Amino acid sequence: MLEKNPVIFIILAFVVIMIGTSVTMIAPFKWINGPGDRIAEVKPYTPLQQEGRDLYMREGCNNCHSQTVRTLASDVERYGYGGSYSKSGEFVYDRPHLWGSRRTGPDLAHIGLKFPDPNGAWHRKHMANPQSVVPASNMPSYAFLNKALDTTYSERKMKLLGFPYTQADLDELKGKSEMDAIIAYMRKLGTDIPVKKVEAPAVVSAQSNPFTDLKAIEEEAEALYKKHCASCHGEKREGTLGPALKGSAKPEAELFKLIAQGVEAKGMPGFSGSLDEQKIWKLVTYIKLDAK
């Protein structure tokens, strides 16, 4: 009986486990991550982005944030930020991958699509004080990353990983902080694959805002503003990362278009994919309150 022969039992158990491991973990690599899975647009990390990725792992960010948008429609809508679900070719340069299994915080696989600001202003403010842009966040402050980046092994890392780089790429690391590096990494996530932009809904009669009386919608309009706009424009529309909106002099139709389409050059995402026309008009009414 096996229970009377522990050595044989251990050997058989090991064999069974190895068979299962081979079938589920080893064999699949024979037909995945091959040439057919690669995505031409996905590029290797630059030295700065790679340093940021290493810092991301050092700080344990993958313990709270996953990096894989599942094929579920709800997952794509919530974390795709205009892109699709995650594909294996997106992670061909990730060693190791950071898919994760917990979402204490939001998925970050495509976070670069959500905040296109080339200066990473939103990320910088969020990393320094998460609650300043997401009041309910339980994320700790990472303001301590504002210190000089250690580049001792940067070139060695690039050679070891086989990523292309130039001396100019390495020179760009001079004077950079750890905060600069981790923001550069997050800004890249999800941005390699071209995304078909969602066209903003046509303005239905530019002069016919259906919500001219703020009192009837004030509670909902204020809630929409706090959820989608306050982190960049201030709780009282006084302006922080974005410009002040209190009593905006812009025409209502122009405000509608800006909210719907966004302003990519200034890092403002469009909201046409997450807010319907009625909600956008309510935001317009709330923003224009003090101009009337």
Image (spheres, helix red, strand yellow):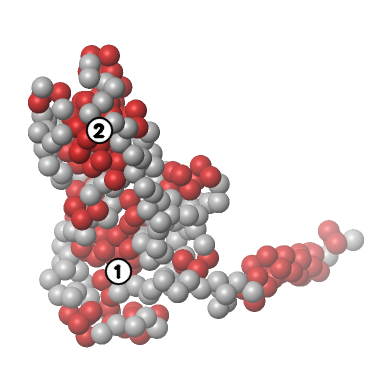
**Amino acid at pointer 1:** Gln
User: Decide: marks 1, 2 in contact (CB < 8 A)?
Assistant: no
Viewer-proximal residue, 279 or 182?
279
Q: Residue 206 carries which label?
A: 2
Q: In this view, does 41 lie above or below 191?
A: below
Residue at coordinates 29% horizontally, 45% vertically from top-left?
261
State the residue lying farthest toward the right.
1
In which quadrant of the rendered view does residue 168 lie?
bottom left
Q: In this view, does 47 lie above or below 178?
A: below
How far, Cα to Cα, is label 1 from label 2? 43 Å
Mark 1 surroundings within 10 Å by alpha-carbon count, few (fewer than 14), some (14 through 19), many (20 or more): many
**Image position of 228 (left or right of 78):** left
**Quarter of the C terminus within the rendering:** top left
Q: Residue 49 carries which label?
A: 1
Of the residues under marks 1 and 2, which one precedes in the sequence?
1
Mark 2 surroundings within 10 Å by alpha-carbon count, few (fewer than 14), some (14 through 19), many (20 or more): few
Q: Where is residue 60 in the image (x, y as percent from the top left)?
A: 37, 56
SS assignment at label 1: helix
Residue at coordinates 24% horizontally, 53% vertically from top-left?
264
